[in-house]
């Protein structure tokens, strides 16, 4: 096996995956940020991403159950609280349901998953199962798409405000909360991956995990492109 990468080289390998394969490059996402999606296409994205959102705390609970140290569990548990909420904080899943209402999807239609496409379900379930079955440092590495999320989410707030004025502004609270949460998650995830993945084999497995996760997000948008084609491509 070749020599392990230095932390800098390892980070560069992880970043390279995001630069080429993160979902911001997907045509459906590009069109979203150009303001070109129809209301129906925006609703399709929100309703399907809900299935991703609701499974995030499930996969984080699987990872939590495998972390051997109390200190690491004390940090990781915050992710579950962010999404499920606690006390007066209703959490990210509820905020996403409100985003749904802000784009015109009734709450019960989000909750009963009637708009969730089969391929989206398969892709998200594959992510949860990856975290269930793989060694925990790889599961943590697969969350590192969050390294690339803050820039994208911050531009999405402006995009939704300016280019989709029909979306009710209170729906954007989810994204605002993520601007604080995602960089903290990414720092924590990078710290764990750098600490645990010391051999070249482990480092390459972490890069592969991040690549797999990019595929999950990409597959979600592929499914949306088929189900909600652009006007000009409609039969
Ligand atoms: O809107 C986005 O572009 C985006 C991307 C990602 C991501 O990169 O996986 C996450 C989120 N949002 C997000 O809101 C979120 O809570 C989240 C958790 C995770 C994860 O894998 O643990 N990714 C993401």
Image (cartoon, helix red, strand yellow):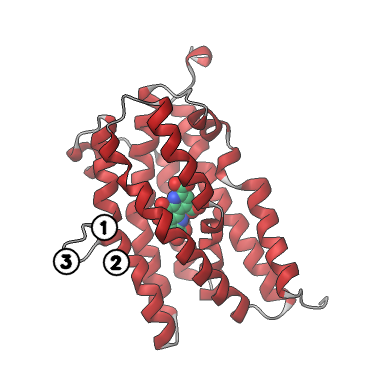
Residue displayed at 49% across by 52% down: 150
Q: Earlier in the sequence, mark 2 or mark 3?
A: 2
Q: Find numbered disc 3 in the image and state the secondary structure of the residue it sits on.
A: loop
Q: Find numbered disc 2 in the image and state the secondary structure of the residue it sits on.
A: helix
Q: Nearer the viewer, residue 210 or 86?
A: 86
Specify few, some or many for label 1: CA neighbours under 10 Å numbering under 14, 14-19, or 20 or more. Answer: some
Q: Is residue 175 left or right of residue 31?
A: left
User: How much space separates mark 2 and mark 1, taking CA atoms?
Assistant: 7 Å
Residue under numbered circle 3: 87
Specify few, some or many for label 3: CA neighbours under 10 Å numbering under 14, 14-19, or 20 or more. Answer: few
User: How much space separates mark 2 and mark 3, taking CA atoms?
Assistant: 10 Å
| Residues tagged 2 and 1 counted as in contact (Cβ below 8 A) | yes
Residue displayed at 46% across by 65% down: 185
Residue displayed at 38% across by 43% down: 49
Image quadrant containing the N terminus: bottom right
Instruction: Give the percent coordinates (x, y) of residue 91.
Output: 26, 57
Mark 1, ligand 1, within 8 Å: the answer is no
Q: Is residue 230 above or below residue 19?
A: above
Using the rendered image of the protein, determine whether residue 124 is visible from the camera's viewpoint. Answer: no
Residue displayed at 48% across by 61% down: 183
Residue under numbered circle 2: 81
User: Which image quadrant is residue 83 in?
Assistant: bottom left
Residue under numbered circle 1: 91
Instruction: Give the percent coordinates (x, y) of residue 196.
Output: 60, 80
Q: Is residue 228 above or below residue 66?
A: above
Q: Earlier in the sequence, mark 2 or mark 1?
A: 2
User: How much space separates mark 1 and mark 3, taking CA atoms?
Assistant: 10 Å
Q: Find numbered disc 1 in the image and state the secondary structure of the residue it sits on.
A: helix
């Amino acid at each position: 096996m070749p020599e392990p990468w230095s932390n800098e080289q390892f980070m560069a390998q992880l970043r390279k995956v995001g630069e080429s394969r993160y979902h911001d490059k997907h045509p459906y996402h590009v069109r979203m940020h150009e303001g070109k999606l129809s209301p129906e296409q925006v609703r399709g994205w929100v309703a399907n991403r809900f299935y991703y959102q609701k499974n995030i705390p499930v996969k984080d609970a699987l990872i939590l159950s495998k972390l051997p140290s109390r200190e690491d569990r004390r940090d990781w548990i915050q992710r579950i609280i962010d999404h499920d909420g606690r006390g007066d904080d209703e959490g990210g899943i509820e905020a996403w349901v409100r985003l749904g209402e802000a784009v015109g999807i009734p709450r019960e239609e989000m909750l009963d998953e009637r708009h969730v496409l089969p391929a989206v379900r398969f892709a998200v379930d594959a992510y949860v199962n990856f975290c269930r079955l793989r060694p925990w440092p790889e599961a943590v590495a697969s969350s590192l798409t969050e390294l690339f999320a803050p820039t994208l989410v911050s531009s999405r707030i402006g995009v939704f405000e300016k280019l989709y004025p029909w979306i009710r502004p209170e729906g954007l609270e989810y994204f605002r909360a993520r601007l604080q949460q995602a960089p903290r998650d990414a720092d924590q995830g990078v710290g764990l991956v750098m600490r645990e993945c010391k051999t070249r084999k482990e480092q390459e497995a972490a890069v592969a995990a991040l690549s797999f996760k990019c595929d999950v997000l990409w597959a979600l948008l592929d499914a949306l492109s088929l189900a909600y084609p652009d006007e000009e491509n409609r039969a």
